[in-house]
Image: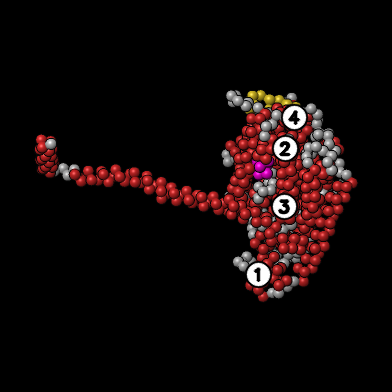
């Protein structure tokens, strides 16, 4: 079978699995799990075969005209280069792991059949984006992913949080998709084709008439899809969906699509120096802001969500300095350890009965209850913190090396200013990343208090997947040298300068966080015990806090916030065992000491949602209210008047129609008399004149 045929089957098999799953979900529930896992597994195997055959050599191109348009043609095209085949491998492996994990994680969920089918469709759409050689076909996969994310994030539609999060994710990403679509049409108009190869040829020949405008329009769509500032606010709220969905979205599909798109069309962006600087600033703000926000989150999944935003910022930063090899290398390593982190977080949530780090910090021995999750998440967090020799170290260093080269003026692909912005923000983000990774590990696995509940060993379908993903999280970085040959040939190995800067910053962040955690733990242990009633959610200041000194009141308010965050979620409700009681009391949180007065603002995402509410939501609602008033009071008045006039005239005419013949004869006689008198008067007037 030819490589092209195999490549066609890679996105087709999950699509067929999704269709079959939807059709047979209720009539033949026994086929649901095989239809979820086997197509994804077969697609992953075929993606590996395609990658081996392609081998990082000359791109494989195949196309056929999809439909005549009369102007710019639309082709069903494949474009298989080193970037495409490796990213497709990542998508296939992570999707298979998610489907296998979900068979145990959602085993009691009555909506599992539709969930599994949507995950398969999600996977198929991303693979279509990865392999497509035509931008219009790519756009189909791009939009299908948005629809799937809406349904999957809103899986627990009974809750207000899930409904709001799914709608927010859909609207925010569509807000970016509008300029993105305009940019695609403008790009195709200048290039005369939607084919990626022809577009890149046009760019190389200097044939783009509006490079800056096109690049900025496309960048808006990328910011929405890949959750970059200022369109990143949907991603933390999307944690209301099932944890395996979060793993799929964050590691290998939706948010990776924007970065991959820019990598595919990087010459288009390099044609505009202004666009590269804008991309660099966007990446820098995203990296630093998300790192600060992650330090203030109590929900373990929201910490990981902000972490994803920051790591995507690294990838965008690499693209902003013109090194798509470093960007995709970090995409691959991040996909492995981020999938592991989310799936491991699912095990922790099941075991602890809560997603609150503050509540976990008041449980003792949680690491011993779930040793598989403990060890694999430790590996993933070390990779996230970019500690050598884990995968994240090598891929993050590749980004910093690219930024250093751009800052030193060693590349013409990006201005030096973009290099300095990305380099400084990248080093600072390395410190913040190590800090919140250390905070998460300490609060989740080194809690102090009553013993964590023991519910036995987690299913093999969940723990086995964790160990499978731990392998690339640990060893993928060692493949940096051979992977470079699959990309543009640029070196992906660390340099001494960036290694010292990045690893030194990470070490400072980790050590500082540990020291502050020790101090916070000592203070929490010395604080008076907080009664469970004091930890109950209450508006304003609790009664217990009012009776305590200021320092103790702060711990009580922390406990109150933790109790609110630890409220049972639909995911926790699906655990087959009884929910453990969340211990009350102060939480040892080093994030408060690290951030100081910034903590309150960082916990709220620096109030960007409030800013958007005032700048956009409220004006739109006010405009809608005005339109409704004008429609009801003005337009409806004219419409009602147009109907009332004939009705009034008709009522007057109806009164004259009495049905009495004598009345009709009297009126006829009176009319005749009037006409005769009028005629005589007019005759006399005319005779006298």
Q: Secondary structure at mark 4?
A: helix
For residue 290, the mark is 3
Stretch in magenta: 219-224
Query: Residue drawn at (72%, 60%), measured in percent from left and top?
Result: 598
Sequence-wise, the earlier of marks 2 and 3 is 2
| Left or right: 669, with 111 as reference point | left
Query: Residue drawn at (77%, 71%), measured in percent from left and top?
Result: 526
Does residue 565 sit above or below 76 in this rendering? below
Q: Secondary structure at mark 3?
A: helix
Q: Quadrant of the N terminus?
A: top right
Query: Residue drawn at (60%, 48%), measured in percent from left and top?
Result: 168
Mark 2 Cα shell of 10 Å, populated few (<14), some (14-19), many (≥20) = some
Write down the residue under mark 1. Answer: 534
State the image coordinates of residue 169 (x, y, percent, origin top left).
62, 47
State the image coordinates of residue 352 (x, y, percent, origin top left).
71, 58
Sequence-wise, the earlier of marks 4 and 2 is 4
Does residue 200 sit above or below 301 in this rendering? above
Sequence-wise, the earlier of marks 1 and 4 is 4
State the image coordinates of residue 279 (x, y, percent, origin top left).
72, 43
Write down the residue under mark 4. Answer: 204
Mark 3 Cα shell of 10 Å, populated few (<14), some (14-19), many (≥20) = many
Task: Tell me the distance, in whole angstroms, between the alpha carbons under discs 2 and 1.
Answer: 58 Å
């Amino acid at each position: 079978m030819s490589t092209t045929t195999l490549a066609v089957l890679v996105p087709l098999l999950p699509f067929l699995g999704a269709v079959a799953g939807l059709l047979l979900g209720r009539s033949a529930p026994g086929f649901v799990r095989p239809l979820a896992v086997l197509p994804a597994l077969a697609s992953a195997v075929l993606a590996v075969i395609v990658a081996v055959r392609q081998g990082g050599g000359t791109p494989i191109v195949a196309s056929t005209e999809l439909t005549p348009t009369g102007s710019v043609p639309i082709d069903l095209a494949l474009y298989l280069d080193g970037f495409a085949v490796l990213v497709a491998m990542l998508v296939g492996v992570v999707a298979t792991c998610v489907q296998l994990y979900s068979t145990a994680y959602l085993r009691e969920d009555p909506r599992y059949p539709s969930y599994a089918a949507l995950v398969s469709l999600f996977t198929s759409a991303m693979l279509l984006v990865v392999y497509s050689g035509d931008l219009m076909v790519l756009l189909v996969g791009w939009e299908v992913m948005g629809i799937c994310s809406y349904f999957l994030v809103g899986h627990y539609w009974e809750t207000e949080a899930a409904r709001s999060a799914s709608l927010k994710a859909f609207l925010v990403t569509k807000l970016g998709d509008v300029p993105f679509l305009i940019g695609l049409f403008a790009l195709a108009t200048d290039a005369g084709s939607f084919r990626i190869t022809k577009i890149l040829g046009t760019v190389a020949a200097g044939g783009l008439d509006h490079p800056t405008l096109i690049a900025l329009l496309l960048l808006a769509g990328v910011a929405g899809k890949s959750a970059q500032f200022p369109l990143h606010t949907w991603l933390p709220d999307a944690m209301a969906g099932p944890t395996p969905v979060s793993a799929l979205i964050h590691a290998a599909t939706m948010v990776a699509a924007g970065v991959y798109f820019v990598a595919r069309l990087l010459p288009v962006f390099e044609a505009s120096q202004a666009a590269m600087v804008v991309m660099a600033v966007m990446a820098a703000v995203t990296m630093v802001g998300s790192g600060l926000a992650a330090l203030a989150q109590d929900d373990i999944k929201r910490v990981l969500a902000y972490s994803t935003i920051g790591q995507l910022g690294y990838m965008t930063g690499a693209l902003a300095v013109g090194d798509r090899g470093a960007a995709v290398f970090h995409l691959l390593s991040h996909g492995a350890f981020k999938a592991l982190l989310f799936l491991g977080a699912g095990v922790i949530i099941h075991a602890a009965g809560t997603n609150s780090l503050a509540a976990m910090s008041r449980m003792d021995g949680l690491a011993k209850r779930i040793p598989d999750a403990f060890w694999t998440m430790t590996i993933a967090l070390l990779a996230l913190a970019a500690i050598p020799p884990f995968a994240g170290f090598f891929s993050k260093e590749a980004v910093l090396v690219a930024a250093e080269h751009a800052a030193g003026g060693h590349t013409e692909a990006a201005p030096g200013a973009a290099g300095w912005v990305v380099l400084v923000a990248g080093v600072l983000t390395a410190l913040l990343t190590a800090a919140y990774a250390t905070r998460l590990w300490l609060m989740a696995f080194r809690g102090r208090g009553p013993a964590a509940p023991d519910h036995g060993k987690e299913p093999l379908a969940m723990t086995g997947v964790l160990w499978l993903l731990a392998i690339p999280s640990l060893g993928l970085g060692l493949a940096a040298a051979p992977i470079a040959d699959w990309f543009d040939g640029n070196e992906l190995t660390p340099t001494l300068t960036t290694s010292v800067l990045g690893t030194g910053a990470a070490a400072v962040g980790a050590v500082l966080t540990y020291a502050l955690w020790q101090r916070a733990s000592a203070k929490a242990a010395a604080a008076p015990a907080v009664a469970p009633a004091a930890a109950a959610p209450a508006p304003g200041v609790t009664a217990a806090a009012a009776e305590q000194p200021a320092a103790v009141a702060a711990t009580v308010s922390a406990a109150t916030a933790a109790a609110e965050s630890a409220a049972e979620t639909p995911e926790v409700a699906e655990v087959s065992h009884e929910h453990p009681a969340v211990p009350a009391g102060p939480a040892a949180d080093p994030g408060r000491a690290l951030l100081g007065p910034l903590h309150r603002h960082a916990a709220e995402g620096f109030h960007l949602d409030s800013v958007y509410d005032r700048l956009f939501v409220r004006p739109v609602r006010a405009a809608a209210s005005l339109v409704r008033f004008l429609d009801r009071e003005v337009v409806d008045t004219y419409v009602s008047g147009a109907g009332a006039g004939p009705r009034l005239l008709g009522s007057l005419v109806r009164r004259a129609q009495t049905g009495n013949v004598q009345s009709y004869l009297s009126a006829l006689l009176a009319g005749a008399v009037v006409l005769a008198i009028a005629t005589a008067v007019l005759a006399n007037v005319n005779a006298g004149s």
